[in-house]
Amino acid sequence: MEMAIDERYTLQSIIWRRRWTDKLLSFRIERPTGYRFAPGQFARLGLKPPQGGEVWRAYSMCSASTDDYLEFYSIVVPQGQFTPLLSDMQEGSRLMLDKRAMGFFDAYRLPPGKDLWLLATGTGLAPYLSILQDPAQWQRFERIVLAHCVRHPSELSYQAEIEALREHPLWEEHGHKLTYLPVATRDTPAGMLGERIPALLQSGALADAAGLTLAPEHSRFMLCGNPQMVEDTHRQLMKMGFRMSRQTAPGQIVLENGW
Ligand SMILES: Cc1cc2nc3c(=O)[nH]c(=O)nc-3n(C[C@H](O)[C@H](O)[C@H](O)COP(=O)(O)OP(=O)(O)OC[C@H]3O[C@@H](n4cnc5c(N)ncnc54)[C@H](O)[C@@H]3O)c2cc1C
Ligand SMILES: NC(=O)c1ccc[n+]([C@@H]2O[C@H](COP(=O)([O-])OP(=O)(O)OC[C@H]3O[C@@H](n4cnc5c(N)ncnc54)[C@H](OP(=O)(O)O)[C@@H]3O)[C@@H](O)[C@H]2O)c1
């Protein structure tokens, strides 16, 4: 039976915005009472364009599953239907929020291991910001490596917030486990990694930068971002002996396409 429209979504106000570059922004909306999600899941956000109708898009939650707001990190695609409207919205503007969180991009789909590798391009960083606020992940793994690959260094958003994660009182004693590896493939500053993630995996440069070895016995991977990057990284990891993790056959990789 089809649900009435007002049973499908709630209207939520934007309560905070931050612009990182002309193409990247973050925003928070009020979190409805009873809205539940697991770190790594996405929300569906809707807008009504001036010409009529509705546009709905998937957005990974960046905030902790315990925060009383929902935070999102967004690209602005000039020719897109959703993001130019989003870019013009101010605090107090309202968005539609589908009542159910969705998705299966979940660190718990990975069997226990020693090292958790969180590999992202662009806004594929978003789900990891939530996953890194799950105290259990800091206990499950000996090391967590977050590699964020962007074109230009100015697109390495959330650096201060990532640094601050180490000091969080809920997992402070484990804060040393996190290694953050920023990667900029264009205008790469001296000392920063500058190749795409699959190439860095193939050459061993990513493992070296983290001071770790990669092996199916102890390495676990999450991939999120540009679908071509997800595909190429998956293929490279397969060549190295890693496999997708499935319910019937636990492996070392879970992935999500960023669009
Ligand atoms: C599971 C899932 C989670 C997502 N989470 C996020 C998120 O947290 N943040 C976010 O900004 N987007 C996210 N997206 C993409 C988002 O749903 C929209 O596609 C995006 O906001 C652009 O909307 P649009 O209507 O302006 O353009 P669209 O018409 O939707 O996209 C136009 C083109 O822009 C490019 N594009 C779309 N999204 C991105 C992106 N994120 N980064 C780089 N290029 C892109 C693609 O080439 C795409 O074909 C997610 C998508 C999926 C499927
Ligand atoms: N960011 C910009 O300045 C800019 C400017 C104009 C238009 N756009 C458009 O905006 C959209 C989003 O741009 P974006 O920069 O956020 O995302 P993006 O194109 O996905 O690039 C983000 C990072 O992913 C890397 N990457 C791309 N394809 C890959 C692959 N197959 N394997 C591994 N890594 C890969 C890129 O490396 P490479 O640098 O090697 O590609 C870059 O480091 C794109 O559709 C783009 O056409 C962006």
Image (tube, rainbow, N blue to C red):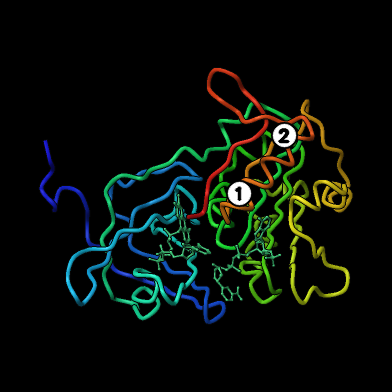
Circles 2, 1 touching at the beta carbon (< 8 Å)? no
Q: Taking 214 as reference, is 26 above or below it?
A: below
Other residues around mark 2 within 10 Å, as few (<14) / some (14–19) / many (≥20): some
Q: Taking 92 as reference, is 9 above or below it?
A: above
Q: Identify which residue is drawn at 25% across, 61% down.
A: 96
Which quadrant of the structure image shows residue 72? bottom left
Q: Secondary structure at mark 1?
A: loop
Q: In the rendered image, which residue does mark 2 sit on?
A: 238
State which tag comes first along the sequence, 2 or 1.
Answer: 1
- At which x and y percent is residue 95? 28, 66
Q: Identify which residue is drawn at 15% across, 48% down.
A: 7
| Labels 2, 1: front one | 2
Residue 52 - label: none
Q: Identify which residue is drawn at 41% across, 75% down.
A: 79
Answer with the quadrant where ligand 2 appears in the image: bottom right
- At which x and y percent is residue 217? 78, 25
Q: Taking 226 as reference, is 17 above or below it?
A: below
Rounded to the nearest whole Å, what is the CA distance between mark 2 and mark 1? 25 Å
Q: In the rendered image, which residue does mark 1 sit on?
A: 132
Which quadrant of the structure image shows residue 218? top right
Q: Secondary structure at mark 2?
A: helix
- At which x and y percent is residue 152? 69, 74
* 75 vs 101, nearest the viewer: 75
Amino acid type, residue under disc 2 in the picture: Met
